[in-house]
Image: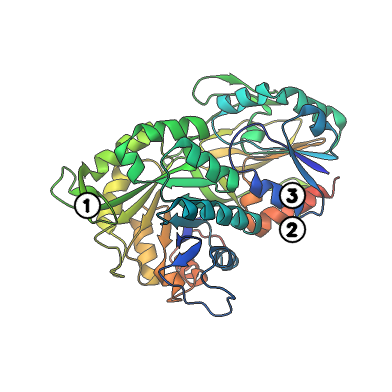
């Protein structure tokens, strides 16, 4: 009896369409987040994450519609992140059918937002997304914003610890150094985070081959997020799971 | 018709759709009088124990659940909707529950919390027929841990053993979320709906 390690595909959604490209056959509309969510659900995803990168108010309204259509058809947990600034934003997303929300920049600007969301909806709905990279800070990792383009000067580990104390239930740890390299998850960063925190860690950034997933679990991750390797069919979720299973990790069949 | 008690915040859409897959009409309501008209009842719940109890009391949910229990018709409690059926909860202070099952819902003793993800259930109830060896989706940090002699208890272990599902007479309740547990969850809901 073991808790399975989770595999989580992430979809970037802009004005209701999946961006960053997806390469699937047999899909009527590969740009439709709902179609893709169903596909990943069928392929064994343990959860799904939508990252709303819409800049406009209209885009955000579209996201709510997509969340509700997804929740009506895909019966696995759905996390939605991007542009969440208020408790009411969270309420709308949960009401639409999201199970969890992830927050990033808004929490850096106003950390009390974490307390407010956790007090109202519980820690379990709240994922802190952290875009971290190596820098001359106390732990050697700093928090960035704008996809790694801007430094906050915040020490990443101090920030995560503060956020956990305030009430986040999970950490989505995005390595800006590993992101896009396909050379593996940021093992050092995962280990440093695991040593400090007792909430689940979702590792993100750098997945390129199936063994990378096992390495991140070995370093202490509880769940693994990936985008391009799944979108472009480098391998299937089931291939990752069989590899992990053979390596001795518990996965959901 | 299946009625889902709407007494707070959180995702009820998934539950609404998952129970609708059984072919029954599904009504979301926060009115005790409407709730009672249903043929079967769902008591959901997310968030902290005390906050849930407070929101439940605000809509006379205690009365609604009591009506449902006394009706003899099937009731399905989910997550905190199961926890509040116990005597009390020790999340952010001590809070009294509805007391249908003896025991306190307390913090799980595990190195990493919340317990989030898919885990096995040592299924005992016939409602698990066909999905006895499947994993179900959990998300919680608190749990009921004691034996309940008068009820059928299914256990899960994460750090320690706790109640994953409990059934007694017309009450069936799960710590996990069947509405988020994919095909296994849908099958469980289908089995339960056969009691209607």
The answer to whether tags 2 and 3 share a subunit is yes
Residue drawn at 81 percent across, 54 percent down: B23
Q: Is residue A138 visible?
A: yes
Distance from label 3 to label 1 (Cα)? 46 Å
| Mark 1 and mark 2: Cα distance apart in space | 52 Å
Q: Which chain's residue wears label 3?
A: B
- Rendered-image quadrant of the C terminus of chain B: top right
> In the structure shown, which secondary structural element does the residue marked by tag 1 occupy?
strand
Please tell me how crowded label 1 is: few (under 14), some (14-19), or many (20+) other residues with Cα within 10 Å: few
| Spot occupied by residue A36 in the image (x, y as percentages of width and height) | 54, 67
> Is any part of residue B159 visible from this angle?
no
> Residue B71 or B169: which is nearer the viewer?
B71
Mark 3 on the same chain as mark 1: no
In the image, which disc is placed on residue A115?
Answer: none
Residue B130: numbered disc: 2
**Quick one: SS at disc 3?**
helix
Marks 3 and 1 close (CB-CB < 8 Å): no
Q: CA distance from mark 2 to mark 3?
A: 18 Å
Label ID, residue B19: 3
Q: Quadrant of residue A55?
A: bottom left
Evaluate if marks 1 and 2 touch, with contact meaning CB atoms under 8 Å apart. Answer: no
* Residue that badge 1 annotates: A150
């Amino acid at each position: 009896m073991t808790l399975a390690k989770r595999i989580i595909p992430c979809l970037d959604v802009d004005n209701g369409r999946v961006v960053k490209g997806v390469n699937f056959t047999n899909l009527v509309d590969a740009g439709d987040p709902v179609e893709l969510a169903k596909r990943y659900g069928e392929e064994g995803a343990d959860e799904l994450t939508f990252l709303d990168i819409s800049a406009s108010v209209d885009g955000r309204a579209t996201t709510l519609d997509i969340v509700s259509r997804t929740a009506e058809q895909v019966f696995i947990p759905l996390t939605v992140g991007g542009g969440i600034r208020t408790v009411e934003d969270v309420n709308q997303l949960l009401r639409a059918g999201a199970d969890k929300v992830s927050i990033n920049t808004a929490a850096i600007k106003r950390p009390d937002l974490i307390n407010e969301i956790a007090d109202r909806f519980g820690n379990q709905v709240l994922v802190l997304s952290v875009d971290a990279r190596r820098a001359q800070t106390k732990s050697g990792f700093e928090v960035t914003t704008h996809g790694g383009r801007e430094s906050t000067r915040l020490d990443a580990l101090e920030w995560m610890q503060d956020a956990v104390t305030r009430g986040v239930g999970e950490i989505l740890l995005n390595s800006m150094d590993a992101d896009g390299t396909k050379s593996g998850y940021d093992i050092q960063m995962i280990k440093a985070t695991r040593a400090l925190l007792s909430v689940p860690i979702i590792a993100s950034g750098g997945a390129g081959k199936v063994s990378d997933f096992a390495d991140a679990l070995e370093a202490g991750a509880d769940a693994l997020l990936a985008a391009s390797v799944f979108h472009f069919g480098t391998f299937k979720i089931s291939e990752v799971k069989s590899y992990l299973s053979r390596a001795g990790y518990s996965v959901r069949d | 018709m299946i009625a889902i008690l709407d007494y707070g915040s959180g995702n009820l859409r998934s539950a609404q759709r998952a129970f609708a897959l059984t072919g029954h009409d599904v009504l979301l309501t926060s009115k005790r009088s409407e709730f009672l008209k249903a043929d079967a009842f769902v008591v959901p719940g997310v968030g902290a124990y005390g906050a849930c109890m407070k929101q439940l009391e605000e809509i006379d949910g205690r009365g609604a659940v009591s009506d449902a229990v006394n009706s003899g018709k099937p009731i399905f409690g989910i997550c905190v909707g199961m926890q509040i059926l116990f005597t009390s909860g020790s999340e952010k202070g001590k809070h009294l529950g509805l007391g249908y099952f003896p025991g306190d819902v307390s913090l799980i003793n595990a190195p990493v919390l919340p317990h989030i993800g898919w885990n096995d259930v040592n299924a005992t109830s016939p409602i698990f027929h066909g999905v006895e060896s499947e994993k179900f989706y959990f998300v919680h940090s608190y749990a009921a841990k004691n034996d309940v002699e008068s009820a059928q208890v299914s256990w899960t272990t994460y750090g320690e053993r706790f109640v994953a599902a409990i059934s007694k007479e017309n009450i069936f309740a799960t710590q996990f979320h069947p509405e988020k547990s994919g095909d296994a969850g849908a099958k469980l809901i289908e089995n339960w709906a056969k009691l209607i």
